[in-house]
Amino acid sequence: MDYIKWELKVFFTNHKNLILFAILLVASVYYAFYIAPAYQPIESVNQNEIESRYEDRQEFLDNVEVTPGTHPLTLYSYQVYPEWNELDGERLSALEDGDLRAYAQATHEWYLYADYQIDTNRFEFLRYSPGYYTYGNMFSHQDGHYAYLYSAERYGEYASAVYNLNLNIFEERTALQTLQRLLESSLPYILLLSCLLLSNDIVMKDRKHPSIVNGFPMTPFKRMIMKGIVALIGSLASIAILLPAFFVIGFRDGFGTLNLPVVVYQFAFLNEGTFESMPMGMFLMISFVMVLIWFVLIIGLVLLMSIILKNEYFNLMIGIILFVEITYYQRGEIIENWLSYFPTSYVQFADIISGYRNYALLTGSLEYEKGLVVLLLTVILIILLIWLVTKKKRMTI
Amino acid sequence: MIQLNNIVVQFGEKKVLGGITTTFQPGEIIGLVAPNGTGKSTLLNVLMNYVVPNQGEVIFGDNLHYTNKKNEAHIRSLITMMPDQSDLYNHLNGMDHLHIYRQMWSQTSIEPNEVVERLNMAHYVKDKTYQYSLGMRQRLCLAMQIVANTPYMLMDEVMNGLDPDNVELISKLLEEKKKEGKIIIIASHLLENLEKYADRIFLLKDGEFIYSRDYRETVSDEETYLKFSSRENDKLVEELKEIVPELRYEELTNERVIMNVAQFSANQYLQVQAHLSQHAQVNMQIGTLDLLDRYSVHYN
């Protein structure tokens, strides 16, 4: 414990680490103040849009005359618009009445109906929301399909929610939902790279103080484990540094609750899977466990490379493992199941927990339970290697 | 007790230690004397197991060897090497350094404040170490080791950068530690001072002890020399040759001329002294060779 206290003191007074913490703090607060408020979800609560679509279709329904010679598209619209518009009408009424639970129920049904019509219509004139049809996106239809069923599941959960609803929850702007969104995008890279940068010199910094630390009365393996614990605590502190930004978003847009639904896609052959929900609390807990294991894995690699190669700059190469999966997980390619046994496949762990990875890559092989086992086994292997190397190798820095 | 059995250290073709065998007893201050690069630091590193000897073994206490990592950790709870002042953490203060040594050697360590008081460090110990002078850093390094208070203490150039007051202060402290039964091994080139407090001194050359002296014992058969130093050694030697035509002398690297008095007749002895005494700038001594002389003799 005494050695840990010492290492913690050195770690938290290390200029490089302090600068990194400061950068994380400033960047996250900037995000909370400027970037998060500008977030515009494609599936927003847009009364004008609903109203405009409702009126257009109602006018069509009021004026259309169906005869034996009516164009098939007109006939098709005549058949599908009434129910569709009824749902839009319910949504509008609910919004006007301020009854968000009724809005959620109608929206749940609206998304299910809309997705069914768009996904199955033979004429291909129906489209999902325009936000998916961006330049260069080869998977617009799939994205829209996912988003509609995702939204249907989400609003279905809201309709039966026991907590208070608001538009920020619907548009996923609350602090917890923002955290979820970030975990499903860049936050894993930021956290894991921070862990690497914070810990990369945890062993090699001793090189500047050999006559002080080399004689400490402890086995090299114990020393490595202690250093690992300190690097882990330091890396967890990088998560704590993000708390001010979380609070800024929370006080402005609401925190959300741990019962908010996180939609999980259960893969089935040809992406005919189902959309279910898990509580936000569960999602965050699994994410935290994944981050924790990733931290241990990265720190373990830093320790191992430090005692073998003895160069902190080589340690930075560990960062490559975070981006390896890009080379073999390409959307639209055929995904081999055995690739899911690589720990590098689980960097985007939040997307794996939510099942989005399986949907996007058209595979059922990526599951967080498997990821936990793969990552844990990798960690055990690394710790074993550290033990072996420290047993065999001279440990003067 | 520390026992060195035939310690051989070789780096490539170069033999740094060529079979050192000796025993250090509790309550001894050992002086290791040699110019830089002659193996004294290597010997200390062997004692710490930073360097593994090609041959031989070091035994601590009853039968403790560096046989595995667990034993190494155990031995290191009994031995400390004084930190190098350039290794201090510049962004931490002196007290932080003392506390880690206190905590890491918790079984033997003593209260840091006592040591701070003893070494007159109270006025600066809470400042960050980058502000320290050479002497302040050196005192902190020694204080760290004193706080650890292990039975075996190794010190490399402990008096470096210290002013005479502090040399005296630390000499006294080392004496006290010796009385507590510790084995203190000091590698140093500050010879005159070392001679005052070391119990035994070893001169190391070509990887071997070429001279050793136990200052606790009186040496009866040591030869007596007449020694002098001046700015005109050569001229004086020529003048002395007129008194003693067959004069046998040696000029050491410390610019001292030594002459064995056994070569003089009684008359010559008096004449030589009288002649040297006439020169005001001549520093003349009669006695056995001191450590400085031995050093100069062996490392010419």
Image (tube, coloured by chain):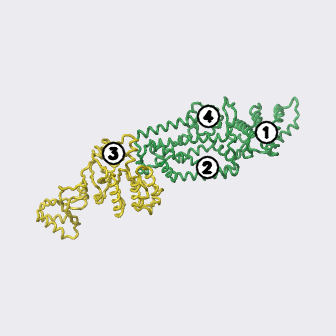
Chain colours: A green, B yellow
Q: Quadrant of residue B240?
A: bottom left
Q: Crowding near pointer 4: few (<14 within 10 Å), some, many (20+)?
A: many
Give the secondary structure at mark 3. Answer: loop
Position of A380 relative to B162 (above/below): above
Q: Are marks 3 and 4 on the same chain?
A: no
Which is more toward the observer, A332 or A369? Answer: A369
Tell me the residue that label 1 is attached to: A106
Tell me the residue that label 4 is attached to: A367
Kind of residue indicated by mark 1: Ala
Tag 1, which chain? A
Kind of residue indicated by mark 4: Glu
Residues tagged 3 and 4 counted as in contact (Cβ below 8 A): no
Marks 4 and 1 sit apart, C-alpha to C-alpha, by 32 Å
Which is more toward the observer, B283 or A125? Answer: B283
Query: Which of label 3 and label 1 is nearer to you?
Result: 3
| Residue B100 appearing in the image | yes
What count of labels does the image hold? 4
Tell me the residue that label 2 is attached to: A242
Report x, y in % for residue B152: 35, 50
| Residue A129 appearing in the image | no
Give the secondary structure at mark 4. Answer: loop
Q: Residue at x 78, y 43 (%)?
A: A100
Tag 2, which chain? A
Marks 3 and 2 sit apart, C-alpha to C-alpha, by 54 Å
Give the secondary structure at mark 1. Answer: helix
Q: Residue B61 has which mark?
A: 3
Kind of residue indicated by mark 3: Gly
| Residue B6 placement, left or right of A7 | left
